[in-house]
Amino acid sequence: MKSAAYEKVKMKELTAPNKKVHVGVYIASVFLILLYLLPIYVMLNQSFRYMTDLTPRLYFPEKWTFDNYIQAFSTPELINGFKNSILYVLEVCAIEVVFGGLAAYGLARAGGRLSSALRTFNICIMMIPSLSLLVGTYSLMVKFGMINKIWALSLQTAAIGMAGTMFFYTSFIVSIPKDLDEAAAIDGAGIFRTFFQIILPQLKPVTVTRLIMIAVGTWNNYAMPTYLLTDSRKATVILIVRKAFSVAAGAVQNVPLACAECAVALLPVIALYILLQRYIIEGQLDSVSK
C-alpha cells in the first residue's frame, strides 16, 4: 500500500506546470501576433514613404514623410466619408440596442413554448449569411426608393444584426431576477420605464460589448454600401478607401496615399475600443465575482 507522502509527491508532479509546454505556447502566441500585425506594419510603413520610393515593403522608407497623411486629412471625399460612416454607425447602434434590447426583454420574460420557439428561430436566423440576401434586399429597396439613403442602409444593416443583438441580450436578461420587474410594477412603472431605468443599466457590459461589435462591423461594412450607395456623396469611408486603392484608366496608383487613408480610416474604431474596453473588463470581473 502506497504511503500518503508518496501520493502527495505524485500529485505534485502531475499538477506541476510543464515549462516546455509553456515555452511552446509563448512562441506560438508571439508568432501569431506578429503574423497578425504584419499587414498593419506594411500599411503603416507604406504610408510614411514617397510615391517614388520602391524599396521592399518590409524595409523602412528611404525618407520619412507625413505628406500622405496631410493630403488624406485634406481630401474632401474622405472627410465626407467619415461623416457618412459616423452617421451610419450611430443609427445602426441606436436601432439595434433599443429595439433589439426591447425584443430580447420580451422574449426573456415571456417564458413558455412560444418564447422558446422564437428564441430558437432567432438563432437559426443568425446562421443565414447576409450576402445570400443581397439580391432580394437590393430589389426590395429599389422598389421602395431606398437607394442612396443612409437611413435606409442603417435599417437594412440593423435588421441583419438584430438577431445577434437579441441573442446577446436574452442570455443576460434571463439571469436578472424577475423580482425587480415586479417591484417596479408595484411602484407604477410601465414596461418601457422598467426596461430603460432598471434592466438596461444592469446590462452595461453586454451593451458595451455589443456596441463595439456593431460599430466595428458597420464601419467596415463593404458589400451592402457598394450596391446601395451608388452616389459618391453618400459613400462611406470604406468605399473611399476602396476607391483610393483602385486604379483608373491611364492613372498611376498612389499606394502610399491609399495606405495613409486606410490608416486614418482605422483610427475611430481603435479609439472606440480603447475608450470602452474598461467597461468590458469590469463586466467580466463582475461576472467572475458572482
Image: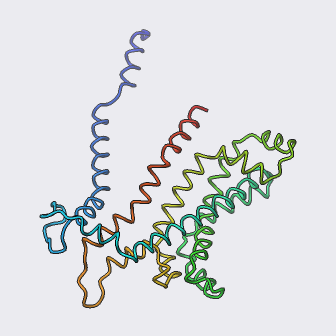
What residue is drawn where x is 63% and y is 62%?
Answer: 96
Total marks in image? 0
For this view, does 258 lie left or right of residue 86?
Answer: left
For this view, does 5 lie left or right of residue 179?
Answer: left
Give how far across and how far down residue 27 sits, in percent.
27, 43
What residue is drawn where x is 74% and y is 55%?
Answer: 107
Of residues 231 and 209, which is closer to you in this image? Answer: 231
Q: Quadrant location of residue 156?
A: bottom right
Give how far across and how far down residue 162 sits, in percent.
63, 63
What residue is drawn where x is 65% and y is 46%?
Answer: 172
Q: Is residue 228 above or below residue 278?
A: below
Q: Quadrant of the N terminus?
A: top left
Of residues 161 and 5, which is closer to you in this image? Answer: 161
Q: Quadrant of the C terminus?
A: top right
Q: Quadrant location of residue 126?
A: bottom right
For this view, does 89 lie left or right of residue 124?
Answer: left
What residue is drawn where x is 28% and y is 46%?
Answer: 30
Q: Residue furthest bottom?
A: 250
Q: Is residue 13 above or below residue 66?
A: above
Give how far across and how far down residue 166 sits, in percent.
66, 57
Give how far across and how far down residue 112 sits, in percent.
81, 52
Q: Is residue 266 above or below residue 257?
A: above
